[in-house]
Image (spheres, rainbow, N blue to C red):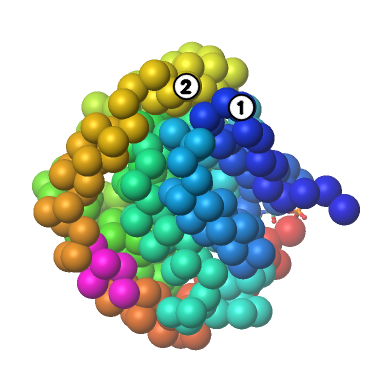
Amino acid sequence: MTETLLFDRERGLLTVRLNRPDKKNALTRAMYSQLAHALTMADTDPQIRAVLLTGSSDCFTAGNDIVDFLEQPNDLDNPVFQFMLSLLDCRKPVIAAVAGPAVGIGTTLLLHCDLVYVSRDARLRMPFVNLGLCPEFGSSLILPRLLGQAKAAQLLLLGEGFSGEQAVAWGIATEALDNGEAVLAKAREVALRFESLPPEAVRISKQLMKAPDREALRKVIEEEGKLFTQRLRSPEAVAALSGFINRR
Ligand code: COA
């Protein structure tokens, strides 16, 4: 059976690659569990200086697996929440390399990474409302603050997509590059730089940058999670999610 996540240790860098190309790297419960485990392990392993999270050169991820959504609606013990908390709590720098579609949690997880490299034509989108759902992973707090209410509503209420270039202009991503290969090369080069930076200074600086919002985010993630879980069982969501599965 093909591994849906590939792990690579290169000196002080742990690279985690989403590897479910036939389903556009859609994330299953098993994948969230493994991701949470990898981040927790990276956090405590002194040899690891940074984590690089990526997908394929033409697709980051189509977000949560929609079949999983219907068959095993999330609850707060779900691996997806373990993953969210492990990313929120990770004290090491997390760098994302994104090309092609980055849908749902594929976009919201970027709001918690330290450095985000995207292809210019990456297609980011948070179609939660379109699917009868609601925002998750702290996006209802972070995006209005970052972009203002009017722009955040365009992304979260209308579920409009945006490009990698726009993500950089809005402060969601660090830098846009020409294609998936260039994105991965840049992200890897940057991630490896943490090997020669003093790790304690990096850790304390990241902690200072994240501390002011940490508790508020934790509360919002929990509140969003409760509503999201309820929404998954709603007729609106069941119709929209079944519609995606039966669309062919
Ligand atoms: N969950 C489960 N399967 C998914 C999936 C998801 N989130 N996204 C894509 N897939 C599957 C498709 O069902 C299809 O499987 P099949 O070949 O067995 O029918 C395969 O991946 C390829 O998808 P397809 O839609 O044909 O690829 P595309 O290149 O035309 O479009 C996307 C790619 C990502 C834009 C599109 O698949 C999409 O919008 N997916 C849903 C995203 C979503 O709503 N996620 C949840 C957010 S909360």
Q: Is residue 157 above or below residue 199?
A: below
Front-lying residue, 202 or 99: 202
Q: Residue 192: which disc? A: 2
Horizontal and vertical percent for residue 69?
58, 72
Q: Residue at x 54, y 17 (%)?
A: 185
Horizontal and vertical percent for residue 122?
47, 31
Q: Is residue 65 above or below residue 106?
A: below
> Circle 1 — which element?
strand
Range of residues picked out in magenta? 217-222
Horizontal and vertical percent for residue 247?
68, 61
In this view of the protein, can residue 202 be seen by the observer? yes
Q: Amino acid at mark 1?
A: Glu
Q: Is residue 221 magenta?
A: yes
Q: Is residue 147 above or below residue 10?
A: below
Q: Residue at x 57, y 26 (%)?
A: 11
Q: Is residue 111 magenta?
A: no
Residue 164 horizontal side relative to residue 30, left or right: left
Q: CA distance from mark 2 to mark 1?
A: 9 Å
Q: Residue at x 66, y 35 (%)?
A: 8
Front-lying residue, 209 or 168: 209
Answer few, some or many: residues within 10 Å of disc 2's Cα (few below 14, many 20 plus, some between 14 and 19).
many
Front-lying residue, 106 or 30: 30
In this view of the protein, can residue 157 be seen by the observer? no
In the picture of the structure, the residue carrying the numbered disc 1 is: 10
| First-in-chain label (2 vs 1) | 1
Q: Amino acid at mark 2?
A: Leu
